[in-house]
Amino acid sequence: MFSHIVHVDEINRTTPKLQSAFLEAMQENAVTAFGKTYDLPKPFFLVATQNPFDAIGTYLLPYAQVDRFLVGISTTALSVQGEINAIKSSSNPAAPLSEKEIVGDYTNEIESISISDELLEYCANCTLWCKKQ
């Protein structure tokens, strides 16, 4: 958890207690272990996948917890040709960057971004519209 970017694969296969720990990290930017709270590095970004299929042995996230995620994306399986194209396009990957190189230098720039009230209102309305769908 003590990283700038954390990826949780199939969060719905973790126990409710572990799901709660991930959500605490997202909400509070801290984790608690054995009664002691530890701050997480800033910025902290959690990406989680949820496998909606084969629900046996999973602990689905309640809607109150799903709401804490900023973005939800549904995907479908690629065709055979789509898989081949994806493999070909990623067969020559660039050299990996450390988290410090990716996030560390942009913290001040991100915090200085100004967002208009009109854009905030638009985003809030989109969120409400999506929840109704």
Image (cartoon, rainbow, N blue to C red):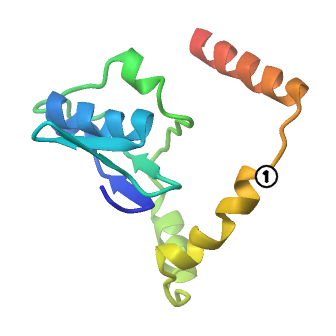
Q: At 33% from the left edge and 34% from the top edge, which residue is drawn?
A: 24
Out of 52 and 14, give the one closest to the viewer: 14
Q: Seen from this angle, which residue lies furthest top? A: 132
Up the image or down, 124 lies above or below 54; here it is above
Q: At 10% from the left edge and 41% from the top edge, which residue is drawn?
A: 34
Left or right? Give the position of 69 relative to 39.
right
Q: At 14% from the left edge and 34% from the top edge, which residue is drawn?
A: 15
Left or right? Give the position of 35 relative to 75.
left
Query: Residue 62: horizontal and vertical position, in percent?
Result: 32, 18
Out of 109 and 131, give the one closest to the viewer: 109
Up the image or down, 55 lies above or below 73; here it is above
Mark 1 closeness class: few <14, some 14–19, many ≥20 residues within 10 Å: few
Query: Which kind of residue does numbered mark 1 sit on?
Result: Ser
Residue holding disc 1: 112
Left or right? Give the position of 30 relative to 74.
left
Out of 58 and 84, give the one closest to the viewer: 58
